[in-house]
């Protein structure tokens, strides 16, 4: 069952009490999307309680998001005390649906609700590194009432990569973004980097991971050919690299070896993403696998044309390349050619910027995401 269409009517008299949980509040795609959800839940008819079992740099923002925020602490991989406390919270608030995003969260919600009529939902994001996560995933999958996938191809990908069979009992709901928080403060990044408006600035917003899922190295390999053709072009990488110091060092070293270091800027993690996006002429994402990437949706909503790898999730989010330029995944030569084409053809960039913005605002907003969730929850609680 797919839920990509936004339901037209949500009946306010059938409000369902829902609990969402995250194990970490560090800045990432799932965390940013959940924060958008919390800020917009009440206005869109969702009675939401949000629980965090670990902290992070977004904690204060979650506390001030407009929903009930409860901060707990998971002290063990399987924390029975945490499960007991979750059970109390769920019972006291008459929660009808609990929703998690990672196997460890789903396991504790299962322990907290087993034997009750509370419905359990797990969103699958597609990357579960390590034996413990894989085992936890296999344990919780049959104990969920519904699975949410971020894209149509994710079920097959999980079977190939994780060895799990989801069957057909899942729904597809893309991530959503709140366009209201993307109002840009200006193009301050250009001032920060000492760039004028004649400079063509490209950029990628993605954390560095040890498994190289975002594939920043292919971008670094493509940049010398782009720079040779476009003498004003520069590139920024935005994202945390603390989890993958070797990959980060390899990217920095490659840029140095290719004598492009002065035109490639590694900015680390930033909190001013609207400022970054508003400063870009072209957004790039070179991922080898994805769920429903927030950074791409944000770029599209802000009218930044995008060049994306041709994996199925990115083809899906761009309507099979209608709203982005696609390149062959992992192919630095093809990426260099597509970047050069996009930089040279301003009319194409402007067309993509306008059409992608309309598409994202209509189909990938946080309002559409919440309404799809409410439709799902309503189908579970009858």
Image: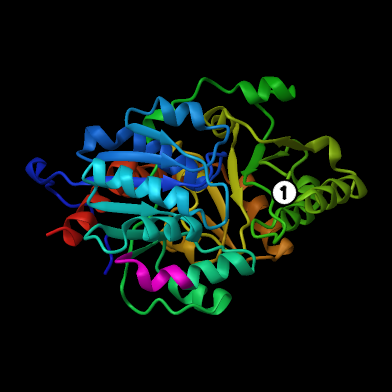
- For label 1, count other residues whose C-alpha is less than 10 Å away and answer few (under 14), some (14-19) or many (20+): few
The quadrant where residue 166 appears: bottom left
Q: Locate residue 42, reporting x and y percent.
A: 24, 33
Closer to the camera, 183 or 339? 183
Q: Is residue 218 above or below residue 134?
A: above
Please report the bounds of the magenta region as a residue range: 139-146
Q: Can residue 258 be spotted in the picture? A: yes
- The residue that appears at 70% across and 66% down in the rendered structure is 331
Closer to the camera, 361 or 228? 361
Closer to the camera, 335 or 286? 286
Q: Which residue is mark 1?
A: 243
- The secondary structure type at the circle numbered 1 is loop
Quadrant position of the N terminus in the picture: bottom left
Q: Locate residue 379, reporting x and y percent.
A: 17, 61
Q: Was residue 300 drawn as part of the magenta stretch in this picture?
A: no
- The residue that appears at 49% across and 26% down in the rendered structure is 60
């Amino acid at each position: 069952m797919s839920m990509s269409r936004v339901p037209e009517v949500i009946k306010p008299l059938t409000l369902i009490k829902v609990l969402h949980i995250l194990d970490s509040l560090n800045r990432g795609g799932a965390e940013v999307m959940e924060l958008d959800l919390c800020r917009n839940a009440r206005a869109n008819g969702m009675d939401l309680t949000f629980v965090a079992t670990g902290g992070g740099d977004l904690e204060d923002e979650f506390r001030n998001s407009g929903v009930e925020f409860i901060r707990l602490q998971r002290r063990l991989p399987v924390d029975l005390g945490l499960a007991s406390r979750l059970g109390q919270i769920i019972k006291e608030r008459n929660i009808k649906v609990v929703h998690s995003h990672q196997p460890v969260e789903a396991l504790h919600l299962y322990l907290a609700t087993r034997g009750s009529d509370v419905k359990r939902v797990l969103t699958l994001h597609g990357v579960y590194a390590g034996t413990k996560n894989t085992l936890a995933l296999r344990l919780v999958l049959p104990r969920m009432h519904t699975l949410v996938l971020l894209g149509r191809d994710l079920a097959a990908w999980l079977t190939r990569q994780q060895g799990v069979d989801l069957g057909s009992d899942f729904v597809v709901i893309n991530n959503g973004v709140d366009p209201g928080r993307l109002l840009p403060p200006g193009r301050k990044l250009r001032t920060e980097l000492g760039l004028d408006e004649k400079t063509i600035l490209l950029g990628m917003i993605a954390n560095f991971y040890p498994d190289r899922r975002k594939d920043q190295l292919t971008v670094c390999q493509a940049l010398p050919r782009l720079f040779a053709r476009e003498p004003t072009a520069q590139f920024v990488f935005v994202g945390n690299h603390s989890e993958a110091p070797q990959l980060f060092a390899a990217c920095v070293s490659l840029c140095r070896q290719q004598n492009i270091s002065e035109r490639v800027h590694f900015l680390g993690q930033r909190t001013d993403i609207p400022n970054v996006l508003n400063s870009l002429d072209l957004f790039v994402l070179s991922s080898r696998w994805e769920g429903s990437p927030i950074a791409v949706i944000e770029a599209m909503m802000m009218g930044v044309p995008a060049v994306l790898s041709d994996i199925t999730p990115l083809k899906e989010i761009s309507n099979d390349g209608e709203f982005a330029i696609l390149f062959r995944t992992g192919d630095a030569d093809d990426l260099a050619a597509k970047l050069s084409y996009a930089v040279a053809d301003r009319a194409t960039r402007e067309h993509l910027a306008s059409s992608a913005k309309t598409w994202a605002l209509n189909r990938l907003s946080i309002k559409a995401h919440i309404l799809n969730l409410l439709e799902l929850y309503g189908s579970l609680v009858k």
